[in-house]
Structures are given as C-alpha cells and as structure tokens.
Amino acid sequence: MQIELYYWPDIQGRGEFIRLALEAAGVDYIDVARGEDGMTQLLDTLQSTAILHPPFAPPFIRTGGAVIAQVATILQALGPRLQLVPPDEAGRLWVHQCQLTIADLVVEVHDTHHPLGNGQYYEDQKPEALRRSAEFRNERLPKFLHYFESILERNPDGDAFLVGAALTYADLSMFQMLAGLGHAFPKAMARVGAEVPRLLALQQRVAHVPNVARYLQSERRLDFNNDDIWRQYPELDD
Ligand SMILES: N[C@@H](CCC(=O)N[C@@H](CS)C(=O)NCC(=O)O)C(=O)O
C-alpha cells in the first residue's frame, strides 16, 4: 500500500516527525510536495471538497484511500504497520500519550518566536517573543525535559527507550525535538541538557539507528532554517 506524505517542501517542520518514522522503518513513500508540481497537489488536496475527512493543515498522508492528518494521529495509524509501537494496547496508548505531550511542546517552541500569532512577522512581535522565550527557557523547557527524563528513568524495561524495550515513533519524535531545541536554544540546552543525561543518550541512540543515520546523511534531510518551528534567533536564547 503506497504512502503519500504531504508537507511544506522547504522546512522540516511537523512533517519531519512523519518522515523520520517512514525513514526509520525503511518503507517507500512519496514526499508529494517535493516532487514536480508538488505544491499544486498539496494545495489541491488541502482544498478538495471530495475528501470526507479533510485535513485542517499539513502534514497529512494519503494511503489506501484514506486521508489522515494530525501528526499524532498519523503516527498512531502508521505505528503498527511501521513496527514502531509495542504489541500491547496499553503500550500503544502510552506511546500516543507521549506523542501528544511532544506535540504540546512543539506549540510552545513555535510560540517563542510567534507569541502573538502567525499573522504577524517575528520582527513585529519581538518584545513579546523576548518575554515568552525567557519563560520558555527558564520554566517550560526544564519542565518538559525533566518530565521525559523521568519517563526514561521509570520505564520498567530500562532507560534505552521511552516505552518498552524497543524503538517507537515517540523516540524518533523526541530525537527530532532535541535536535531542534539544540539548534534553536543552544545555550539553554547546554544548561538543561546537563540535567537530562538519559534523554541526550536517547538522542544519540536514535541518531545511530542505521536507517535514521542514513537518512540524516541524505539530501532528503533538510537543514533547519528560520521558516521552521525551531529557529535560530540568538536573542531568544539569552
Ligand atoms: N496539530 C497539528 C498542527 C498542524 C499545523 O499547525 N501545521 C502547520 C505547519 S507545521 C500549518 O501548515 N498550519 C497552517 C494553519 O494552521 O493554518 C498537527 O500536529 O499536525
């Protein structure tokens, strides 16, 4: 069954959580918007009135006649097929819960540079961004990362993965989040990172999963840029 991924072609963004799962599993997929005429296809699908369960925003996938949006739902749907979830229902629910908490963190990262909303340029909301990012660095970032560190610490199957004893899509997403945070907030991450050694070890472990390592070296892996969720504005990391 073919999998088509629809996401903005020039950033990692939320699409990267899906891309990493597909790449780690080594399945063939079509990154529609990066292909010829891809943006037209993305926008046409987004605006199509023929889709019964339409996506609100990218990323979304099309597979087996279904269109599925929302990062956490896409991963929940693909998880068993990609063998990136535990076998039991309780384990799968826990992976999904972790993913939703990562999604909350994604929104908070985004809001450091756009606290007033996407309708205005960063430069027009800079004073608010400075205040918001200070709170993020000092309160929210440590709270989220300490929480996930404690998840590793209390995993009865050991601290190698967030859930159970094998790689899940939540580990891949945590890798992506830590990579993005290291890019956007190198100073804050140098401080908080020292307090979450298990998470940093997880980031390294995931980076060395053979399919992931191959992907990270490939041209398919874009660099972060300042249209992305994780942006490098040094003044927001001071
Ligand atoms: N909760 C959604 C958020 C989707 C989202 O915000 N997508 C962004 C790109 S990362 C977008 O294109 N938003 C357009 C909009 O909200 O109008 C998810 O996790 O997939």
Image: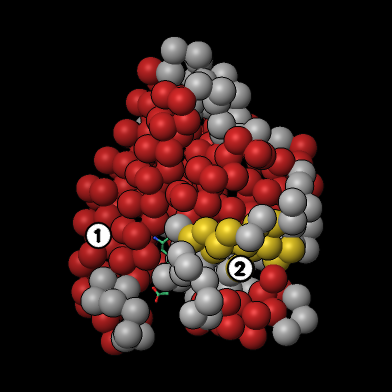
The x, y position of residue 165, in whole percent, is 57, 19
The x, y position of residue 157, in whole percent, is 50, 14
The x, y position of residue 31, in whole percent, is 70, 66
Q: In which quarter of the image is residue 168?
A: top right
**Residue 164 falls left or right of residue 141:** right
What is the basis of the colouring in this image? secondary structure
Residue 225 in the image: above or below residue 81 = below
Q: Quadrant of residue 123?
A: bottom left
Residue 27 in the image: above or below residue 237 = above
Q: In which quarter of the image is residue 9?
A: bottom right
Q: Label 2's element?
A: strand
Residue drawn at point x = 32 percent, y = 42 percent: 144
User: Which mark identifies residue 134?
Assistant: 1
Residue hosting label 2: 6
CB within 8 Å, label 2 to label 1: no
The quadrant in which the C terminus is found is bottom left
First in residue order: circle 2 vs circle 1: 2
User: Which mark identifies residue 160?
Assistant: none
Q: Can residue 14 be seen in this view?
A: no
Residue drawn at point x = 32 percent, y = 73 percent: 114
